[in-house]
Image: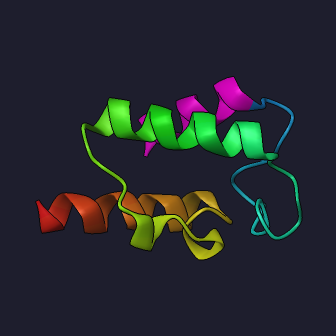
Amino acid sequence: MEKLMEILMEINPDIDYKTEKNLIDGKILDSFSIVNLVAQISETFDIEISPKYLIPKYFNSVDAMWEMIQAILDEE
């Protein structure tokens, strides 16, 4: 999860990712940040994020993102 936190801090270091649970629904991350985040996660974890994971519930919090990454890795 440390790598994920590093990615998020690069995108926007002013957000408290440990407590924030509405990154998408609360419009805290903009569309450019989300595209960047998906690309960085894909590259860092060597995974392909399929369309079924490109929904807000998987990006609203760091915990949700981590669960998504683990689920994708388990599928591979």
The picture places residue 12, in percent across and down from the top left corner, at: 78, 31
* Residue 66 in the image: above or below residue 37: below
In which quarter of the view is residue 35 placed? Answer: top right
Q: Which residues are magenta?
A: 1-11
Q: Residue at x 35, y 30 (%)?
A: 43
Residue closer to the observer: 19 or 68: 68
* Residue at far front of view: 51
The picture places residue 29, in percent across and down from the top left corner, at: 80, 48
Left or right: 12 in relation to 58: right
Left or right: 69 in relation to 2: left
Considering the whole magenta stretch, tell me its main secondary structure: helix
Residue 2 visible in the displayed image: no
Screen quadrant of the C terminus: bottom left
Colouring mode (rainbow / by chain / secondary structure / one colour): rainbow
Left or right: 74 in relation to 51: left
Q: Residue at x 54, y 68 (%)?
A: 58
* Residue 8 in the image: above or below residue 71: above
Q: Residue at x 66, y 45 (%)?
A: 34
* Residue at far left of view: 76
